[in-house]
Image: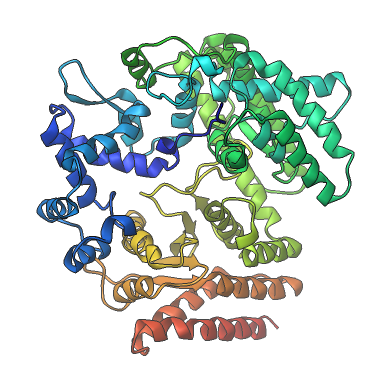
Amino acid sequence: MKKIWSISTTVRNPERIRNFLVALKPLDGEVWNHDTQRRFQILLIQHKLYGAGNKQFTNNLSREHRELLENSETLTYEQAEEILNARNYVGAGDMRGRQSFNPIKKMGLAKIDDQGRIRITSFGEYLLEEDADLGEMFFKSFLKWQLPNPLSRDFKVEDGYDIKPFIATLHLINEVNKICHERGLTEKGLSQVEFDIFIPTLISYQNIQAQARKVLEFRTGLERLANEREKQAYIHSYVSENFEDFENMEHARDYGDNIRRYFRMTRYFHLRGNGYYIDLEPRRSIEIQKILETDNGSSQDFTAEEYIDYISDINLPILPWETQTELVRISNYTADDIRQYQNQLREQRIQIPNFEFKNTDRLSVEQLKVYVGELRDYRRTLQETEDHFVSQNVDKVREYIDRLRNIRQSKEKKSIELEHLAILALNAINDALAIKPNYPVGDDNQPTFTAPANKPDIECFYDAFNGVCEVTMLTNRAQWMQEGQPVMRHLRDFEDANNSKDTYCLFVAPTLHRDTVNTFWTAVKYEYEGRRQKIVPLTINELTKLLEAIIAIKDRGQRLDHRQLMNLYDSIINLTSTAPSSDIWTSQIPGVVEQWSREILSAQV
């Protein structure tokens, strides 16, 4: 039987892949043999990229080894080697090293050359750059990803597979929209349900037009029904009757959600209909049209070596719009779109930053590429300006509170949703100079992933102070393992880079784990790297209480001064002077938030 396809598990966590590559970097150029394979696995354990937080890995370890993996201290190479030896793997540590190398190889980030040496490829070197664009990385990777391919045995030509999934998805949505246009129907891309059913089951480029007709047939049948129960029965019946030759259709919803999330990272898809529909990104219509014209979504014939060389070259494929003529078209199209957007914002009396548009006739190909990037960055600035303006509306703040309280029920990825809501909440406070998220966004300015691991989630700039905001949906001990040291490190790096003002860190989670709190307590009360830090841990509930105070102030036609927010932060930090322990510190924070709310409301009268 056939299987529906999905995003390979090798690319589901780009930060983890990047960290594996960082661990491999010291071995670049060495012969890939039993010794280096074993050393690679030891390096992964040393940097807690393998084993830490995994009960299956730690169950058979001694208490001493478990504590080494669970504490916040960096392991020595010798300690990591001891732990690997203690696991006593069948096939030894070198076999695990080969397995850990496989996802890096399958993504084209590293390879073994003709002399048997480890080589980090140009694609891998790009990912290692400090400000590597994950969206660009996924775009280049997905353009080349095909089924079947020489690195996987899961999808075979004889079973009907002949597809580049990303490109075929562009084609299918375009075909559905085209049919809708011909029939006088609204062009809206694919609904989430349609995407989950018809994208993972599209296994050949030759089926694109037939699949598009099936989408419209399915949509017509579903839209006739008003009752949710009848709709669910219809969906189940349709899938059973039309896709019985796929053995794993029960995973279609999860696979579809994952495909949708990662394809959106490329910025070539956008959400519409309050996130229920996914459509082609109109702001990249020229690029999308070029892809559709030049690639029908069929797979190519490669040897394993040819395929590895192809996917590992950051300069391939050559993009059909990277010519003088096409880049001028793209830049002019984008500039016109921005001018219209500027006019819309001015009509709302929103003050917008200036931008110097350029004469594209005088620009080279490379200069045009840079200019297109500058235009898109400026559009994002305008979108952030509008977000700040909208966040001042009391009804919007109430919406943020409701979404925060019900975040567990959100259909979005919870970690991304919390970062986004934190941005909106901080904007609602009103008088920041800038609130800058570090998460990647699409051209619609909606987040496509969480912030990279080497940066704070959010950077905040005020007249009187600066700050970072870190958020997590983790509530168990993994919260401490993944957030404790990184939060303090991000704060210190930000402090050092912006040292003209006091710097605070707002940390938000559904609940605060005792180990996380104890780590922050030490940094606040004593030191981190020789200096005290100003970390303010709040639960989501406490953040909503703060926003309720903002609403009360706005209802009076007044505004909160950021210095009043700084006073709250200082009050929470000053508790560490009298609280005898970290747990008592956090138990007193809700009372401080309540008292602060009462005081600012009485002060505003």
Q: Is residue 353 visible from the viewing direction of this image?
A: no
Q: Residue at x 57, y 86 (%)?
A: 595
Q: Find residue 543 and report its horizontal and vertical position in percent.
A: 57, 71
User: Which corner quadrant holds the C terminus?
Assistant: bottom right
Q: Residue at x 32, y 28 (%)?
A: 105
Q: Find residue 41 and report its horizontal and vertical position in percent.
A: 20, 43
Can you say whether 557 is above or below 230 in the image? Answer: below
Can you say whether 280 is above or below 521 in the image? Answer: above
User: Which corner quadrant holds the N terminus?
Assistant: top right
Q: Find residue 26 and report its horizontal and vertical position in percent.
A: 17, 37
How many marks do you count on the picture?
0
Query: Looking at the image, which is closer to me, 397 or 312?
Result: 312
User: What colouring method underlies this structural image?
Assistant: rainbow
Q: Is residue 225 visible from the viewing direction of this image?
A: yes
Query: Looking at the image, which is closer to me, 220 or 126?
Result: 220
Q: Residue at x 45, y 17 (%)?
A: 366
Horizontal arrangement in the rendering, residue 119 relative to residue 494 (left or right) = left
Horizontal arrangement in the rendering, residue 187 relative to residue 541 (left or right) = right
Q: Find residue 178 and report its horizontal and vertical position in percent.
A: 77, 20
Q: Residue at x 23, y 46 (%)?
A: 44
Name which quarter of the figure residue 186 lies in: top right
